[in-house]
Amino acid sequence: MVARRPVMTDAPGRPGDALATVGALRELKLELTRFLMSYKFATDEMLTKINILKEEFSSIHDYSPIEHVSSRLKSPEGILKKAIRKGYPLELDGIRDNIQDIAGIRITCSFISDTYRIRDLLAGQRDVTVLKEKDYIRKPKTNGYQSLHLIVAIPVFMSDRVQPVTVEIQIRTIAMDFWASLEHKIYYKYNGAVPDTLVDDLRQAADAANRLDVKMELMHDQVVALESGDSDDADLFSFDGLPPFPLPKGLLESFMRGRTDPE
């Protein structure tokens, strides 16, 4: 007896149906992988921009307004749970349009004014589009939470498409970040049912953190003003105070003369 090969068919319960299901699952896995990778690439691009700003300020200016940078990506499970909880359609385009915090970056700054400076520098970049902004610094939440939230879109160049991808950016001071971290731990510990007395304490702590931010920035501005006054009579050709540079002082002086001497 000659063995017969399986017949490809679309009838339910037949081998062809099983193969079609496997093919569909492979295609879905591929699309999900590309979907998640696009958010990773968008995060990488934004982190590169932020780190360039941080390094530039550290090398050229007296201090860098960026103290710390962190990032996170929602897990596939977390994305689907949020889509179900919010009633969003369970398809990739619907998730992309409705869930805009899949990729997140947190920037911790030294002072309140730095949060807005970093916001302006990022928003001014040609390929960054600010879609939404929530200023919880000027208008804190009722529980005292303060932070500057941005939803930005950045183009990600894949092998066969250019995909605009959204990234949530939170910009806050060190004091704001410390308060938010503590608040998160407390709400997690009490499973959201935080006692009223502790809620009041958190609000008072937020007010204290804000006063500290304002006071520290005022002190910083005073120090900067004193340093500026001391340098008014300084020799313009002196290299004192400049950070180390990989060229001998003599070569730098020659280069400076070449730029200033008339032709």
Image (tube, helix red, strand yellow):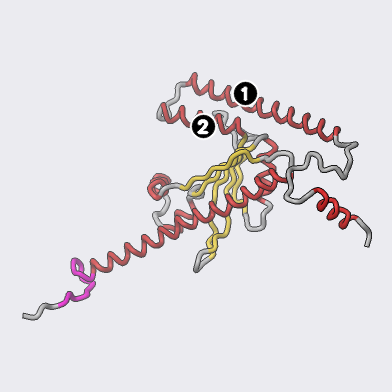
**Residue 115, image x, y percentages:** 66, 40
**Residue 141, visible in the rendered structure:** no
Residue shown at 62% from the left, 48% from the top: 51
Does the magenta run of residues contain 7?
Answer: yes
Question: What amino acid does circle 2 point to?
Answer: Ser
Q: Which residues are magenta?
A: 5-16
Residue shown at 51% from the left, 67% from the top: 161
**Residue 227, image x, y percentages:** 81, 33
* Up/down of 5 relative to 189, above or below: below
* Marking on residue 208: 1
Does the magenta run of residues contain 146?
Answer: no
Residue shown at 70% from the left, 37% from the top: 113
Tell me the quarter of the image containing the C terminus. bottom right
**Residue 68, image x, y percentages:** 59, 39
Where does label 2 land, which residue?
A: 181
**Residue 248, image x, y percentages:** 78, 50
**Residue 171 in which image quadrant:** top right
